[in-house]
Image (cartoon, grey):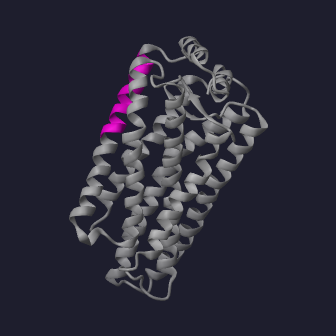
Amino acid sequence: MIESNVSLSCAWCAGGGDGTRAHLDESHSEHSLSPTGHLVVAVCLGFIGTFGFLNNTLVLILFCRYKVLRSPMNCLLLSISVSDLLVCVLGTPFSFAASTQGRWLIGRAGCVWYGFINTFLGVVSLISLAVLSYERYNTMMGATQADSTNYRKVAMGIAFSWIYSMVWTVPPLFGWSCYGPEGPGTTCSVNWAARTANNVSYIICLFIFCLILPFVVIVYSYGRLLQAITQMSRINTAVSRKREQRVLFMVVTMVVCYLLCWLPYGVMALLATFGRPGLVTAAASIVPSLLAKSSTVINPIIYIFMNKQ
């Protein structure tokens, strides 16, 4: 995200060999965090990775053990937990190891893979939340109660979330933008810093279709639902409706916390892409990245403690 990363990321995207890797180490030795800074980041990543893994594993265990939890809506929450768990297993350990050493450790291919898998799984979570909000909207605004045994639409929603995310995160692997180092060089993501038309066009599309559009769906769905719940509370106090309201409150809280985790990262990425070079420093870029990764810890906590099932 710092100015030196512009040439660095572009060099990696161009496919540099050992010389490019040497340039990576040299550049980040001059424009990186202090040893203490890297240690603090490593501790934070260790916490996020450990508790994210434990919390999401607990969610999976509960789903396997208690049949009552396997409702269609909860299957969407399960999909989010799976994507968060995969981040903790396939992504966080590598950035943790890199932070302990103060440099990226698994080469250019590893950086591209890390950037892709983390971007893909992050988009899966956001799209899944949008699908979840739309499912709740259809259920509560429908004239009849939802069929708790109908998993077909939910399965289609889950498949859509994963396929849609794949469609928008695979292009950098084939030349439309690219994945490369970010921040102090211990993590990798979409190359936010390059100002080429190729790169900027991808970033604009990514933000519109993977952040703004899902957010609009979420706000519209929950806005209409909250309006309906306010009206229903005056005329209907049935237990089923109270349960619907509890679940809705849980999901809304989940969405708000998710956006609080990801909004700083989105703002930082936009500043790196469209702001003046050097505007986002290494230290400033790593904080939003940590907040984004913390969503893997927060989501299952909300689910476990707010779901009275």
Give whichever of 107, 181 is nearer the camera.
107
Measured along the vertical axis of the image, is residue 71 above or below residue 83? below
Task: Provide residue 196's location: percent of width, then percent of height.
Answer: 77, 34
Give whichever of 83, 278 is nearer the camera.
83
Question: How many numbered circles are shown?
Answer: 0
Residue, x 32% and y 81% (percent of image)? 239
Residue, x 31% and y 69% (percent of image)? 70
Give whichever of 232, 225 is nearer the camera.
225
Majority secondary structure of magenta residues: helix
Measured along the vertical axis of the image, is residue 284 above or below residue 270? above
Measured along the vertical axis of the image, is residue 167 above or below residue 96? below
| Magenta region, residue range | 36-50
> From the image, which quarter does the C terminus lie in?
bottom left
Residue, x 68% and y 21% (percent of image)? 7
Q: Residue furthest left?
A: 65
Task: Provide residue 98's location: percent of width, then percent of height.
Answer: 43, 24
> From the image, which quarter does the N terminus lie in?
top right
Name the quadrant containing residue 250.
Answer: bottom left
Q: Residue furthest right?
A: 197
Say left or right for 62 vs 74.
Answer: left
- Residue 133 magenta: no
Residue, x 43% and y 30% (percent of image)? 95
- Residue 48 magenta: yes
Task: Provide residue 25's location: percent of width, then percent of height.
Answer: 54, 14
Name the quadrant containing residue 202.
Answer: top right
Give whichever of 93, 288 is nearer the camera.
93
